[in-house]
Amino acid sequence: MKESLKIERLEKIAETVIGMDVGSTTAKLVVVENGEVVYSRYERHFSLVRQKALSMLGDIKEHLKGKKLRFAISGSAGYGIACAIGIPFVQEVFATSETVRAMAPQTDAVVELGGEDAKVIFFTGGTDERMNGSCAGGTGAFIDQMATLLDVTPTELDELARKHRRLYPIASRCGVFAKTDIQPLLNQGASKEDVAASIYQAVVNQTVSGLAQGRRITGNVMFLGGPLYYCRGLRERFKETLQLSDEAAIFPDYALYAVAMGAAIYASTQEVITDIDSLEEALSRTPRTESAAPAHRPLFANDEEYKAFTERHARASVDTVDISSYEGDAYLGIDCGSTTTKLVLMTADQKILYSYYHSNRGNPVEIVRSQLEEIYRLIGDRVKIAGAAVTGYGEELIKNAFHVDYGIVETIAHFTAARHFNPEVDFILDIGGQDIKCFHIANRSIDSIMLNEACSSGCGSFIETFAKSLGYGAEEFSKLGLLSRAPVDLGSRCTVFMNSSVKQAQKDGASVEDISAGLCMSVVKNAIYKVIRASSADELGKHIVVQGGTFLNDAVLRSFELEIGRDVVRPAIAGLMGAYGAALYAQNRIQKDGKQTTVLSREELAAFVHTSRAATCRGCTNHCQLTVNSFGNGEKYISGNQCERGAGISPDRIVTLPNLYEFKRQSLMSLASGEGKRGTIGLPLALGMYEMYPFFHRIFTELGFRVVNSGFSSRNLYMKGQYSIPSDTACYPAKLMHGHIEKLIEEGVDAIFYPCLTYNFDEKMSDNHYNCPVVAYYSELLRSNLDSLSRVKFLYPYLNINDENVLTDGLFAMLEEHFERIPRAEIKRAVKRGYEAHKAHMEAIREEGERAMKFARENGRRILILSGRPYHIDPEINHGIDKLALSLGFVVVSEDAVPTDLPPRRLTVLNQWTYHARLYRAAQYATQHADTELVQLVSFGCGIDAVTTDEVHTILEEGGKLYTQIKIDEITNLGAVKIRLRSLIGALEERADTEAPLECTYTELEEGVHQ
Amino acid sequence: MSQKKVKKNQAEQATYARFEPHMKKDYTVLLPTMLPMHFSMMEGVFRAYGYNTVLLKNTGQAVIDKGLKYVHNDTCYPAQLVIGQFLDAIESGKYDTNKLALVITQTGGGCRASNYIFLLRKALERAGYGHVPVLSLNFSGLEKGSSLELSLGMIRRLVAAALYGDLLMHLVNQCRPYEKNEGDTERMADKWTAYLKNELHCGRLYKDRDMQKVYPKIIRDFASIEVEHRSVVRVGIVGEIFVKFSPLGNNDLEKFLIHEGAEPVVPDFVGFCLYCIYDMLMDYKLYKMGGKIKAKGAEIIYHYLVRRQRRMIEAVRQEGSFNAPTPFDVTVASLKGMIGIGMKMGEGWLLTAEMIELIEHGVKNIVCTQPFGCLPNHIAGKGMMKPLKEKYPDVNIVAIDYDAGATRVNQENRIKLMLANATPVPFRGKHESMPEEKTAQQAPIAEEKTETKEKELSKV
């Protein structure tokens, strides 16, 4: 910072004024004398807050000697020390405002990004200060995490970003979502430059949607905080997104010190006068307070326990054979995971010849290439690679690049390996870098699969990132955990929360050992209670195998055993199980198939080149962003496509299987708009309107209105309405509503209609027939948050759609107010037509459902009930999952297309929502048909699905079916979805192989009911 | 929906342990804590009617852990806490689980909360206590055969407990921030809670007439607490019913605010009960559901309760030392079309109405509490911030999410930001306006009519 900086407001202050800002990761200090900033410092504190404050003051001790001081502290980690040493504390956003008012009063808004906080302050038009809520991505910590993922420093990330050519959509809401977006991009060969810039763009989007909440960030905008000071690429993204001119975008050189300066300004208004000696004295007094954070028991009570533990686990090892002397066949297994690439070369008697485990540094193709080269070098002519299989995120890319014989889904690979160690295994838990996978085994086949979702994120890379941020290596950090006497309890929800839990623990004086152990406990608890959802060890199983790189950490392993109160098996090759399983699979299959391996030979490998470029698919209106990988020999591998067309397959070769999602979409779009003698009414095609459209379309058409809808959603449509979303944790289908309304307004409709419906249609299937609160009352929120709605008539009456007369009255009152009077009788007639149209629509869906299932049964196809809500057919909401399922060979049926004449089932929940009652019914149907599977779509943030998922799970499990849940949000990576669907198929095939017939028949279940 | 129809439609529910009448004799019945003073007095009532109730006081990490363990973690925080509290108590070994029953409230609305009882039963099953019966406390006719049977006399005494509770809550909040001798207020509150609990238990002091005699005594007693006359920031607390009221749910929010030198203003519990009754009226008014007779019945109860609440408020006003709470009908009227009165899930329109009422009575700083991912609060809470700030530019609202994973540091930092921007007001500065009694006499149905009209007009 320029030392000549002046804070005019402090000119008249006789004493030396010091402002200190202790944020989540850094501490800043400014010293002001006679209004002039004479000294400033910016340093990382590695959570040693008190010590850092002491040393920073120590550095200028000579200068301050004997002076009268006014001192104030600010920042999220500063409150504790401020209280402890009796110095005024000022909240950091408040401090920022003070600085801006003093230094740049022409500022209209401030965007400030910190280590773990994001803030927006509006000055013009009513001061409003906002901080990120509890669900927060886009912060400095997030950028750091992403840089780690790309294996670059934050500075390098910035350099990369400024050379980008295109942007990919990346979710920044939370680290998990972002990682699942970024990893496949990298694995598919997207350039680091583009990914880096896309990460910044995600931060911008998160700030705009999460904090602006209905207010536009315009005028003179000042950008503050570390990330915005250091990352020029990030600045560019902000400027471009907010459409700011060079003059309007203010990047002051005191960006890092704004809070500290604010604290100084605040200090000048306080009465406390102190001096350096008493400050130092206060700061050095009892630096460690008694830990207030709740603690777990230590991982090991004594050395004996530790010894027994290590000895027990040393037993689960695999024999290795020296690669330089072995002769004969070998099998190669590759696990191209999300963050690491693993290779295993195995002898014919399943001993390990060679293994490799390393971060894939964002370029798995190159790693596999060099490893293959290395293997060829080591084996000479003595060993023949007789077969190979690949698994993991990069499976298809690697399979295509190196002509690997088999590609298998991860779950099957892990199961194959675990079974090798313990044939009786009945539960496998795999915690990798950023995935948690677990599955039960019953009848020697996979029974149910659970993967981690957002809000259940804590995995291995999380511990690693933490270790780094505290200045430790991952291994060193985890070893410290073993020594902890009192592991801190850090909660288990999400990484953002965990960060602040750690902050709090440190404030309370917890040691690094205790934090390390605490983090391990958190990861374990997260896996058990969030992902597996188990409440006791017995629910897991008797023969538990744990694996994945994270379990190589003894502290994690021990925490897990302590938490479930049972010993488990951790193979010594825990990190290599996927690759080892793939090798086992390759051996088994290639012998069965009796074929020759196609893996690139030594010579072919020498000629191997790999390039990738970005492209946009023109196959349909979806315009998927493709990555085209070329391998030098004219071969290509295309990824990013949602359907076969993008892969370059000509449309006539694609088999069209019945798809109820498509059928429903088409039947909505086929409704023509009539004459508009009374005006045009726009119906937003979102939330409940997805089902109500034929109903209200007919009513208004009958009444002589022209009825238009807003069409299906798209990313652009979402962006159009993003600025007015007040609650960032609402579900994506609700957030899309804003864009639909904007679109209808743009189209110039006279009125927009989305009624408030406390009650949905009573389908006589449930105890009550509510809508969810969001579907029911979203109009109230729209009216209050969309200024543009003042330009049209917005109709959102409270209606009872189950009573013809009451509905008629409601519509009559509404129309009378806004349009020329329409006779009640006419409305009643229209309402009658509406009911007919609704009935016909629902029946058409059921008939088509019947037809689709008949087709499936005649053609030997599996039926997949893609079970969600009516609005889940929207291509932007489901991200093309229906098409993906089709491409995997399923006939896709929706939850409202299954027969309704099932006997009622016992439920253990209050069945009170119309849409949700269908889920239970659909699940019940699936349990009664061997050829029918059910996958539940859950929108992130859907509170009600917390109730329904457990119930659907129970229904399916009791009926001997696999339960698969797919959580979808703003951005969903289809790669992960594909793994789940393929795991499902893989498990089904395993089941078929082991001849565990699905014995649950219709009659049996009925008996159960009558018992 | 009529009872007959329910039977036809209702899928057969799973079998679970039921509370049989004979169990009253020797079963211990556990009550979760939401409002410590209110529920303590209610406990006295339940005991008077033969239920051997115990009000749970266990808190802390163990409760949260039990909740996380046995309840789906995406379920709202209150469910996790309530169920966690039960299981923590059951597993404490203090009770014979073969002679134990639990009570949980059920509102029957379209929010997840109506499912708590099922989540609790599931949790009990998983924890190996499937044999422990759960009683539903509701007024919607749910859970026939396994609900707490309420006689008229019992309801009258419960109403008294709620009114006393509200009064004590208001008085405590207006004394504690100012007390000269720390602990005076709490001692006073404990004294009265114990006294009234005993009176209600013995069947005294629950009649309107008797209560009117006790109110002034209580108020005068609190007014005698020695206080410092200083300016403070007054902060309203609104939000989801459980995290708004329960110290366990909101990390002792009231205490934190007092520690920061602020005075908490908490809209009362009876208001929430009135809101539930009002919603029954609205079902008839808006949808013609539930039948005219039921609506009429609800209306009578509504007026009865409003009248009873007004008596308590009147007593505070007459004594003159304290700010009087706002009568419910005034709260309703303050809504003025900000949100539709049909928005009835969760705390629904009441949440918005309470914010407006607070602002209009000079409480410009508000903490809006909600469990993480609370659906109705997307609309009635966060969704209404923009129009509220437009209409009242000087308000200072902060929405705080509560959750097992959320940390106190983050919550408190955001509340501190709000406090930093707040302006202190003079000691017990009087409310700006105190509306007259007459609005209470208007029928809410008629009232709503004009209101909707107004709302519709304001839209055009």
Image (tube, coloured by chain):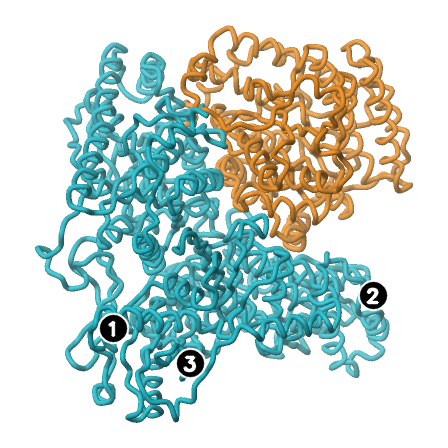
Chain colours: A cyan, B orange
Alpha carbon distance from label 3 to label 2? 71 Å
Chain of the residue where label 1 is placed in the rendered structure: A
A962 sits left or right of B27 in the view:
left
Chain of the residue where label 3 is placed in the rendered structure: A
What is the three-letter code of the residue carrying label 1?
Answer: Asp
Q: Earlier in the sequence, mark 3 or mark 1?
A: 3
What is the three-letter code of the residue carrying label 3?
Answer: Ile
* Nearer to us: label 3 or label 2: 3
Q: Earlier in the sequence, mark 3 or mark 2?
A: 2
Callouts 3 and 1 in the same chain: yes
Residue A273: assigned label:
2
- Return the x and y of residue A814 as percentages of the image width and height: 34, 20
Q: Residues within 10 Å of mark 3 (few under 14, many from 20)?
A: many
Q: Earlier in the sequence, mark 1 or mark 2?
A: 2
- Return the x and y of residue A432 as percentages of the image width and height: 47, 67
Chain of the residue where label 2 is placed in the rendered structure: A
Q: Which residue is painted at 67% across and 71% down in the image?
A: A308
Q: Residue furthest left?
A: A652
Query: For residue A602, which quarter of the picture?
Result: bottom left
Q: How many marks?
A: 3
Q: Which residue is painted at 40% across and 73% down in the image?
A: A580
What is the three-letter code of the residue carrying label 2?
Answer: Ile
As drawn, A972 above or below A414: above
Residue A352: assigned label:
3
Residue A405: assigned label:
1
